[in-house]
Image: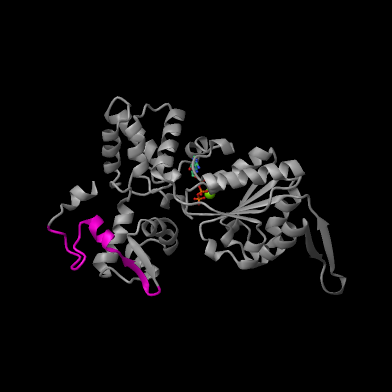
Amino acid sequence: MPREALISGGGYEREDEAFFDSLRPRRLSEVIGQRKVVERLRICLRAAVSRREPFPHLLLDGPPGIGKTTLATVIPNELNVDLQMTSGAALTSPKDIIPYLTNASEFSVLFIDEVHRLPRAVEEFLYPAMEDFRIDFVIGEGIGARTINMPLKPFTVIAATTRSGMVSGPLRDRFLVHEHLDYYSVEELAEIVRVNARRLQCPLDEEAAVEIARRSRGTPRIANARLRWVRDYATARADGRVTAALAAEALEMLEVDAEGLDARDRQYLETLIRVYGGGPAGLEALAATLNVSADTLADDVEPYLLRCGYIIRTPRGRVATPQAYNHLGLEPATGKPARTRSRQKKLL
Ligand SMILES: Nc1ncnc2c1ncn2[C@@H]1O[C@H](COP(=O)(O)OP(=O)(O)OP(=O)(O)O)[C@@H](O)[C@H]1O
Ligand SMILES: [Mg+2]
């Protein structure tokens, strides 16, 4: 998925890999939130180490920027083993994955991002590698063809996906552990903002951490990007200290509203209401009207709007809820501006 699609609404359109990498937790103890997932992974880690076995194959799913890659990198750190990283989109045929499998050292981790994009032929090639630590391939053609059976070192596949529904049943079954990462609470995100402000040596008031957290769509990557913007704003417009009022002002300039929705989220809701009369509207139709890809809407925009109850999915398409009208200051019956509420006041 295009990274620039993840952080919209002005400011930093492109993810700055070095910046985000510097804030990525390295150890399980540094991972904030996702308590139940972390506890279960800790048990798997202890069991694998004490039995001298590979960590079980793990499938992580959840919306973008929620910590899937983070957890996938923390596990080999905890085990003190090698990590290889690839992506479903990069593995177009079985020969693309062979080097990763033959290079895998004992108990090492192979991280496959966007696993839902793995072609079927690669998936099927992976099954014996995951189940029995061996690969079978055919050399030669016709009557001279031979099947070579090659043993592999015991290793672990950690896969991540934003679309668990698109992972095939047989592939999903090969993962012994399946964890879903959900949106973070404001308190958890505020803790992430606090810790990262300290790392960035940015003086930040307690309420400012909460203000940024509240406006970060439950997502650590967005919280980090918004912290970065607020920090620059504080340096440029004030003395560098981030107060709650300054954080709100900086994020308003980014067109991030009090609920954390950005310009693109509001545009989605406005299109659904004004162009499609509140719905039902199909994903493809909305994507065409908004001039963005259907994938971006399905991965990035809709999950949070669904989660907050601004839209619902029906068999006939997406429908705006009264909460969406209310958020935009529109009258549910007419889709016209509500008389009682100033839209600007409600939003910011
Ligand atoms: N639990 C966490 N605690 C602290 N920081 C976190 C946590 N999860 C994620 N982050 C921060 O958010 C950033 C984005 O997380 P990450 O890259 O792991 O997301 P992802 O789920 O892999 O996203 P994508 O689907 O786009 O690949 C990380 O660089 C890290 O700084
Ligand atoms: Mg990732």
The image shows residue 149 at horizontal and vertical percentages of 83, 61
Q: Residue at x 26, y 65 (%)?
A: 273
Tell me where residue 289 sits by quadrant: bottom left
Q: Does 76 sit above or below residue 138?
A: above
* Residue located 30% across and 36% down the image: 247
Q: Is residue 147 left or right of residue 213?
A: right
Instruction: Single out the residue that lies furthest toward the left.
Output: 339
**What residue lies at 50% left-to-right and 39% top-to-bottom?**
32
Q: Is residue 75 above or below residue 244?
A: below
Stretch in magenta: 315-339
Q: Position of residue 286 (x, y in %)?
A: 35, 66
Q: Is residue 233 magenta?
A: no
Q: Position of residue 97 (x, y in %)?
A: 69, 56
**146 or 340, which lies in front?**
340
Q: Residue furthest top?
A: 239
Whether residue 330 appears in magenta in the rendering, the answer is yes
Front residue (pair 304, 93): 304
- Give the image quarter of residue 207: top left
Which residue is more in the foreground, 180 or 168?
A: 180
- Colouring style: one colour
Q: Quick check: can you spot residue 232? A: no
User: Relative to 51, is 163 above or below?
Assistant: below
Task: Looking at this view, name the residue that lies furthest to the right.
Answer: 144
Note whether residue 33 is visible.
Answer: yes
**Residue sitting at x 51%, y 60%:** 163
- In x, y percent, where is residue 15? 45, 44
In the image, is 218 to the left or to the right of 165? Answer: left
